Image: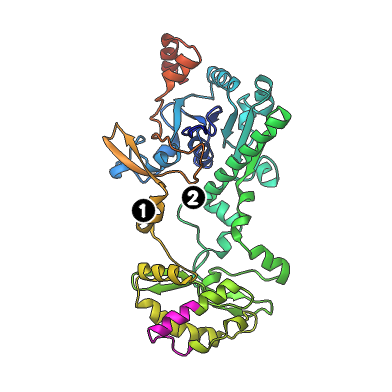
Amino acid sequence: MASEPMPHTLLSPYRILDLTDEKGLLCGKILADMGADVIKIEKPGGDPARRIGPFYRDDPHPEKSLYWFAFNTNKRGITLNLETTDGQELFKRLAVSADFVIESFPPGTMDRLSLGRRCLEKINPGLILVSITPFGQSGPYVEQQYQVTDMILWALGGVMSISGDPDRPPNQISFPHAYLHGGAEAAQGAMMALYARSVMGRGQHVDVSIQQCLPMCTMNTMQYWDMYKVNLPCGVYKRGMVRADGSSLYNPRLWPCKDGWVFLMVGGGALRPLVLSSEALVAWMSERGAAGGLEGCDWEAFDSTTITQEEIDRQRRVIEPFLMAHTMAELYEEAIKRKILLAPVNDPKGMAESPQLAARGFFVEIEHPELGVRLKYCGPWVQLSRTPLSAWKRAPLIGEHNREIYEQELGLSREQTITLKQAGII
């Protein structure tokens, strides 16, 4: 008889010491959501990330940061001052039984604290150290101690050059997006190192450069430069794609409708699914008497390298009024029936009310007893048949698990923890 799935056990044998700030919080969250025992280590008094808003009911309190809530679910939390000798010794004791240490300090900080890779591998050869920094541990930017923000990384990673509208300067994505890419890549690197440890029997250093994670976000812009020596401009999808001959073609992908926007691809050529989609769209428009002469279009002959902007604009003048006569929901429902390549552009409200995400159990409610409420969170991003991600708990309060970890797990006495707290070590 097949055994029943065990909840939240994918990484449950593994312990992680999480020293990251906002640059790397997502790494620990991903691993915690997968079941690892992640211990978030903060400075006494709380981590600076607790001061990042928005805040629950707009109360700027370190225990009410929604940013903190979102990136620290399923973690335990302790306070520890690593700038003190006693704090460093306590950390080493924790590291003896840990599988990972995740940190986002400036390069050299862990060595200065006597907690660098060489020190940690002496006390625990299997330990995997994951470092998440703007430029990694080496290179001229590191040697010159460049200081950056998420926005600067977005710029240096090349993504900002194509972000924004064509009639304005480049802009960043409003949320700290570069940091999220760095944290996600770090989690992947950590899992690669864990697999390597199962083969080699030793841990290693996972050195993550956030800047290095970002060029993949530029999609095909780097290939355009390699092939055509053309830099795609800011707002390329609003300005038009650059063609090999240097001309540009604006074939819209975002279309207005009655209550918002939809993503719709119109075209064809060698892309058979796009041919069928365009034919299905025109057939629907024809049924409503709104095809405007598009019935005769040969979508198989559509060639984006030679078609004129005038022809694209003519198609657009017919298609746009048809879309404007329908809501996002109406367009999406019909697109599914007719196999048209169209999707609504969801805003946060649309995401929260998505029947597909609800059916998949994506949203979970987590109890916050100190607030007297249950808050809705983004939950499992993947469905695992035998080890589902099904256990969820709120982010830890400041020093919430100090006694549990220091006294019950490290064996310190109550008197010792009181003394350490009074000395500002925990």
**Considering only order in the chain, which callout, 2 or 1, is on the residue closer to the N terminus?**
2
Q: Is residue 178 above or below residue 249?
A: above
Relative to the observer, which residue lies in front, 99 or 286? Answer: 286
Q: Which residue is mark 1?
A: 352
Residue 374, horizontal then vertical, whole percent: 30, 39
- Asked where in the image residue 355 lies, by quadrant, the reply is bottom left
Q: Is residue 295 visible?
A: yes
Q: Quadrant of residue 185?
A: top right
Q: Residue at x 72, y 31 (%)?
A: 199
Q: Secondary structure at mark 2?
A: loop
Q: Is residue 133 visible?
A: no
Instruction: Note whether 179 is above or below 35 in the view shown.
Output: below
Which of 94 and 73 lies nearest the eye of the viewer?
A: 73
- Label ID, residue 176: 2
Is 418 displayed left or right of 185 in the figure?
left
- What residue is shown at x 52% (from left), y 47% (from top)? 180
Whether residue 288 appears in magenta in the rendering, the answer is yes
Question: The disc labelled 1 sits on which kind of residue?
Answer: Ala
360 sits to left or right of 127: left
Segment tinted magenta in the rendering: 280-294
Q: How is the image coloured?
A: rainbow
Q: Nearer the viewer, residue 421 or 397?
A: 397
